[in-house]
Amino acid sequence: MTLARLLLLTAVLPALAAAQAAPAAPAPGTPTARVVTLEEVIRTAREHQPQLRQALAATTAAVARSDEARAPLLPQLNATAYYQRATANSSVPGSIGAGRPTSWSGTNSWSAGAFLSQTLFDLGAIQRWRSSGATADAQRATQQATELDVVANAETAYFTARAARDLVGVAQDTLTNQEAHLRQVEGFVKVGTHPEIDLATARANRANAQVQLIQARNLYAISLAQLAQAMGLDGPADFEISSEALPPVPGEQGPGEPLLAEALAARPELASLHAQRSAQELTRGAAQAGYLPTLGAQAGLTQTGPALDTTSPNWSAQLTLSWSLFAGGLTRAQVQEADANLDAIKAQEDALRIQVRVDVEQARLQVVASLAAVDSAAEALVNAKEQLRLAEGRYQAGAGSIIELGDAQVAATSAGAQKVQADFSLASARAKLLRALGRT
C-alpha cells in the first residue's frame, strides 16, 4: 500500500497542496545517519522481533508440557511425617479404652514414612507422553515458519524503503530540472521571445515538483519507521538503508515442478502439520487405551510409635491393577473425537499442499514477469530522458512549446518512477519465492 501511494507522486499535484504537506523528512544520504544493510536488517529482525520471541516461548512451553506428561511414568518418591495427640475413649467392646471411664487425657502418636511407587503398565499415559512430544515437534516447525515470515516481512519492508528512497531521488531530479526550466523561461520572457503564460506555467510546474519532493520524503520517513517495526526495534528509525538487491534465486526461470518438490520438502508448515498428525494419532491411541487395564506397584517404609524414641519399623508392598469396565461410553466418544480431529488435520495438509503449489508458481511467474519489466522500464527511462533533452533543445530554439516541455518532464518523471517500481517488484517477487520455497 505504501509503494502504491508513492507511485502517485508521479502525477501532477496542485501547488496549493504544498501548504498542507507534512514536514519533510531528512533527505537520504544524511552524513550523520548510519547505513544498515539487508543482512543487518534480517539479523536484527531475528534477534529482536517480538513475534519470533513469542514463537520461541511457545516452543519452550510445549517441551515443558511433554516433560509434564512423562512425569507420571517415572518413579514417584514421597515422604510423610505426622504427630498426633488424641484421646482413646471407646464404647466398642474389645477396643482400646473400652470399659474404662471417660478420660480427656490424650496420648501421643508419632509416624514417619517413605513410599516409592512406579507405574508398570499404562498405555494411555505412554501414548499421551508421546503425543505431547510430537506436539512439541510441531511447535518447533511452527517457530521455523514464524522465522521465515519475520525474514520475509523484513525483506519486503527493506525493499519498500529502498523504493521510497529512490522515488525521493526521482522527485529531487524533477525539481532540479523544473528550477532550471524556470530560470530559462524567465530569461526568454524577459527578452520578449516567449509569452508570460510560459513563466506562469513554469512556476506552477516547479511548485508541483516541490510538493512531490516534500511528500516523497515524508513517505520515505514512514517506510523507514515501518522497516524499524519489521526489525523489532522500539525507537526512532535514525538510519539510512543501503542499495542491495536480492541475487537471482536458483531455478527461478526454470520449470516449476523442481521448485515445488523443494518447497514440499522444506516448508516448515507442512512439517508442523505432519507432527500434529502424529500427535493426534498417538492421542487416538491413548483414548483406545481406555479399554485396557493399568498396573502399578508401591513400596513403603514407616516408623510409628507413641514417642520418638519408641517407634517401630514397618514395611509394605503392593501391586495395583485397575480396569475401567464401563465408563458410560466415555472411551468410545474419546476415540471418535480423536478420529475427527485426525481427519481435520489431514484435510489441512491437503489444503496446504495446494497452497504451496500456488505460492511457488505465483512467485516464480512474478519473478519472470518482473525481470522482463525491469529491462523494459530501463529502456523507457532512457528514451524518456532523451525525449526531455530534445524538448529542452526545441524550446530553447523556439521550435517547441512550454506544454511540450512539460509533457516531456512528466514522461521522464513517470519513467523514473516506473523503473523504481520494476526494481521493487523484482526484489519483492524474489523474497516471496524464497519464502514459498522455505528458504531463509
Image (cartoon, helix red, strand yellow):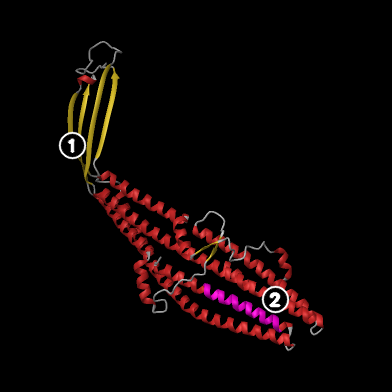
Q: Residues within 10 Å of mark 1 (few under 14, many from 20)?
A: few
- Counting residues from the start of the chain, the first of labels 2 and 1 encountered is 2
- In which quarter of the view is residue 323 placed? top left
- Residue 420 is covered by the magenta coloring: yes
| Residue 74 percent coordinates (x, y) | 25, 44
The one nearer the camera, 10 or 327, is: 10
Above or below, 59 relative to 271: above
Quadrant the N terminus occupies: bottom right
Under mark 2, the amino acid is Gln
List the residue tagged with mark 2: 178
Which residue is outermost to the front?
Answer: 31
Image spot of residue 197 (x, y percent): 79, 79
Asked whether the residues under the numbered discs 2 and 1 touch, taking CB atoms below 8 Å apart as contact, a structural biologist would say: no
Element marked by disc 2: helix
Residue 410 falls in image quadrant: bottom right
Q: Which residue appears at 74% of the width and 77% of the height?
A: 183
> Residue placed at 58% from the left, 68% from the top?
165
Secondary structure beneath label 1: strand
- In this picture, is 80 found above or below 345? above
Across and down, in percent, residue 80 comes to 27, 30
Residue identified by numbered label 1: 318
Q: Nearer the viewer, residue 324 or 365?
A: 365
Amino acid type, mark 1 = Gln
